[in-house]
């Protein structure tokens, strides 16, 4: 409800919420809709994916998830199971951290679209 008034006002040309301009680590964000899209549709999704991969790989025992997958797909046993556990614990968090760092411009300014 808190975001509904700015969202309604953002569709009016020349309104403050339509003219908001924020430079977030090289990303030019113009307008309230684009601001919400960037933070909730892009940045939050990457952060949630990182939290989910860390939780499922390190906090919760990843072998529990692998056992459930094996129950539904018996061919998952053996090498695919070991590879999946390795990816969930090591590869996914590292790749997601690189994606997050790229979003904030650590590897150079984002390309202008």
Image (cartoon, grey):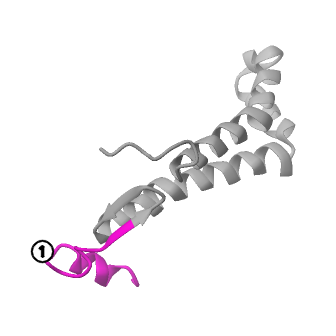
Q: Nearer the viewer, residue 113 or 95?
A: 113
Residue range corresponding to the magenta coloring: 1-22
Crowding around mark 1 (Cα neighbors within 10 Å: few <14, some 14 to 19, many 20+) is: few
**Residue 47, located in which quarter of the rendered image?**
bottom right
In screen coordinates, is 18 left or right of 66?
left
Q: Position of residue 82 (x, y in %)?
A: 83, 23
Q: Is residue 3 magenta?
A: yes
Going 71% across and 42% down the picture, which residue do you hit? 93
Kindly tell me whether residue 68 is visible in this rendering.
Answer: no
Look at the image and tell me in which quarter the N terminus lies: bottom left
Q: Position of residue 57 (x, y in %)?
A: 80, 42
**Residue 5, located in which quarter of the rendered image?**
bottom left
Rendered view: 108 above or below 30: above
Rendered view: 85 above or below 29: above
Rendered view: 102 above or below 11: above
Q: Nearer the viewer, residue 29 or 12?
A: 29
Q: Position of residue 94 (x, y in %)?
A: 71, 39
Look at the image and tell me in which quarter the C terminus lies: top left
In screen coordinates, is 48 left or right of 14?
right
Q: Is residue 105 magenta?
A: no
Which residue is under mark 1?
Answer: 13
Q: Count every numbered label the image shows and give the total.
A: 1
Q: Nearer the viewer, residue 78 or 24?
A: 24
How would you classify the magenta stretch by its main secondary structure?
loop
Kindly tell me whether residue 76 is visible in this rendering.
Answer: yes
Q: Nearer the viewer, residue 105 or 17?
A: 105
Dot 1: element: loop
Going 76% across and 48% down the picture, which residue do you hit? 54
Q: Position of residue 95 (x, y in %)?
A: 65, 37
Going 55% across and 45% down the picture, which residue do you hit? 102
């Amino acid at each position: 409800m808190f975001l509904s008034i700015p969202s309604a006002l953002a569709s009016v040309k020349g309104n403050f919420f339509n003219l908001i301009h924020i430079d977030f680590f090289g990303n030019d964000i113009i307008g309230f809709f684009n601001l919400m899209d960037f933070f909730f549709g892009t940045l939050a999704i990457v952060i949630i994916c990182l939290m989910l991969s860390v939780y499922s790989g390190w906090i919760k025992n990843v072998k529990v998830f692998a056992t459930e997958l094996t129950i539904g797909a018996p061919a998952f046993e053996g090498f695919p199971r070991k590879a999946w556990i390795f990816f969930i614990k090591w590869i996914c968090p590292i790749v997601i951290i690189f994606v997050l760092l790229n979003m904030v411009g650590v590897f150079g300014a984002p390309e202008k679209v």
